[in-house]
Image: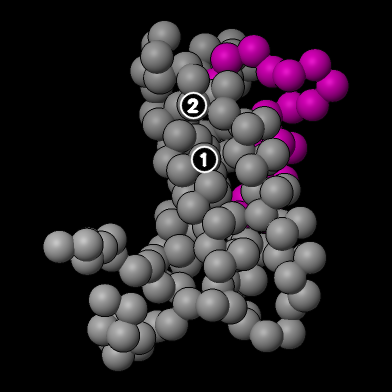
Amino acid sequence: MGKTTAVPHTKKFYLAYGVVGASALAAALWMWAVSSGATREDRFGPEIPGASWGALLVAAIVVAAVAGGFIVLTRPVPRVLRWAVSLTAAISAGTVSPIAMLLLIRPSLPALLVAAGVLGMGVAGAGAVRAPSLRDSASGARQAA
C-alpha cells in the first residue's frame, strides 16, 4: 500500500512523441501545400487573419524539432532556454489547434494529423524541461519504483 504505480517516463518516451508530432505536422503541411484554395478551406478551415496555416505549421514543426533536440541534449542547454522552448511549444500547439478542433465538426485527415501533432508537441515540450533529470537505463526505472 502506498506505492505508486505510475510508470517513470524516459527521454525516449518524450522523444518519440516529439518525432510523431513533427511528422504528423509535416504531413499536414504537405497536404496544405498540395491542395487548392477551395479544398484547403474545406480541409483546414478558415485561416487566422494575418497568418497562413502553412506558415504556422512550419513554425510548429520547427518548435517540435527544437524541443526534440533539447530532449536529446542534457547539460549544455540552460534551464531558462528549455522553459522558453516548452512555453513556445504550448503556444504553437494552441495556435494550430483550431485545425484539430475541426474533428468535432467535420472530420478530415489534416485535422487528425494536426491533432496528433498538437499532442506530440505538448508532450515533447514537457519533455524538453524534464530531460536533464530523466534516465534512459532500466536500472534508473527500477530505482524509482
According to the image, label 1 marks what residue? 118
The answer to whether marks 1 and 2 mark residues whose Cβ atoms lie closer than 8 Å is yes
The question of residue 22 being in magenta is answered with: no
The magenta segment: 44-64
Quadrant showing the C terminus: bottom left
Query: What is the quadrant of residue 103 in the picture?
Result: top left
- Which residue corresponds to mark 2? 100
Residue 3 appearing in the image: yes
Q: Is residue 112 left or right of residue 52?
A: left
Residue, x 55% and y 73% (percent of image)? 131
Category of crowding for the residue at label 2, using alpha-carbon neighbours closer than 10 angstroms: few (below 14), some (14–19), many (at least 20): many
**Kind of residue at disc 1:** Val
Q: Is residue 68 visible?
A: no
Measuring 63% from the left and 32% from the top, which residue is drawn there? Answer: 94
Residue 25, given in percent of the width and then of the height, sits at 53, 44
Numbered marks: total: 2
